[in-house]
Amino acid sequence: MWQVLFDELKSQGFVILAVATDQAEPARPWIDAAKPSYPCLIDRDHHVADLYGLVNVPQAVWIDEQGRIVRPPETAGSTDGFRGMDRKTFTLSEAIIAERERIKSLYLDAVRDWVAQGANSQHVLSPQAAQARVKAADPAIGRAHALFRLGQHLLREGQADEAAQRFAQAIELHPDSWNVWRQTAQKDARGLAAGPAFWARVDALGPRPYYQPIDMAGV
Amino acid sequence: MITILNEQRETRPAHALAEGDSLWLDRSGIEAATGWSWKPEGLCQGELCTPLPRQTAKPMVRGDRLDIAALWQHMGHPVEHDSAGQTWVLGTAAAARAQALSTLEAPDFELPDLAGQTHRLSDYRGKKVLLATWASW
């Protein structure tokens, strides 16, 4: 999704920093297959998630030439449409697919508009509007990030049991973080945390979103 | 050896001493582990100094060492350690993260690509940056 956009816009002072909220080895095959020409960075301890208050992927932040945030973290083109998947056939309805494409296109077009128009883009938020979107602090989240960091280190040191305990604590403190839950959950043969436990946790959301819907002009 | 994790640092200061929930470090250990300087005025980073609390339930200073875990928590930040007291995380308060974000200055960071080359966000100053996350899971 990003390579096409990057190829189109890279000569206009634009770069994509693709941060894998992930470990290097599972991320590697995806990067090798995509062969992106923009930087693909590995954030094995989820430091960027800690800094920016991220909870899931894909999320994105727009940062201008002066290093200022012009769109704080938000869901980048994904929707909760997958929750409507037929779990026997693994198919999505045409309506869901169409809506997903619509949201994705809207997001990509918004990025194009920003690159073309800069600060004059309707999608560039005023400082007040951007600040209003910065999430309030919950002390438990800071603890959760520290526990996740500890767990990842312990895992690297071969202390899997204690790492698991720390991850469980982190999840309890920061239940909204799918980054932590999925990174530490059992993976299937494809490396996805998409088994019954995942679906149960998604179902338990009820009316709450898996992906916070984007608040963007035109959506 | 005790390992201390703080922001993107990972250090093993000599003379680090763990006792329960206390982590005793000397001046050089604190500087290496956190980037903060322990001065008479308190714990300082640049012009900003946090004075040591006057009255504490347990002493925070012992000889040339400071219980950095106690001070870190006094400053409002989370501290976590493994059960053996060998690995410590001096975390950052969620309030501090939110405060930083609300200045709208994009927090800088340094991460490697698969070739091992490190990139800082600030390396890309002068361009519009789409910082986008993804994962294999």
Image (spheres, coloured by chain):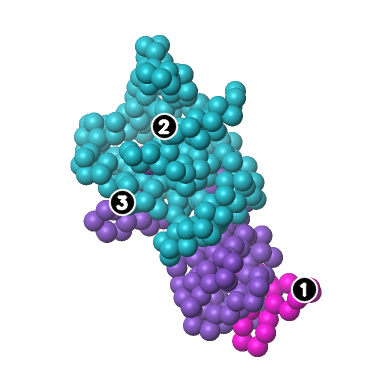
Chain colours: A cyan, B purple
**Is label 2 in contact with label 1 (beta carbons under 8 Å)?**
no
- Taking the spot 32% from the left edge, 56% from the top edge, the residue there is B112
Is residue A112 visible in the rendered image? The answer is yes
In this view, the residue in front, A169 or B23, is: A169
Q: Position of residue B70 (x, y in %)?
A: 67, 70
Mark in the foreground, 1 or 3: 3
Query: Mark 1 sits on what residue?
Result: B56
Q: Vertical placement of A200 versus A142: above or below?
A: above
The kind of residue tagged 2 is Ala
**Labels 2, 1: one chain:** no
Query: Residue A109 falls in which quadrant of the image?
Result: top left
User: Does residue B54 appear left or right of residue B104 in this picture?
Assistant: right
Count residues near mark 1 (Cα–Cα under 10 Å), then give few for <14, some for 14-19, many for 20+. Answer: few
**Which residues are the magenta region?**
B45-67
Q: Secondary structure at mark 2?
A: loop
Provide the chain ID for the residue under circle 3.
Answer: A
Provide the chain ID for the residue under circle 2.
Answer: A
Q: Main secondary structure of the magenta part?
A: loop
Ranked by sequence position, the earlier of labels 2 and 3 is: 3
**Spatial separation of the CA atoms under disc 2 and disc 1:** 47 Å
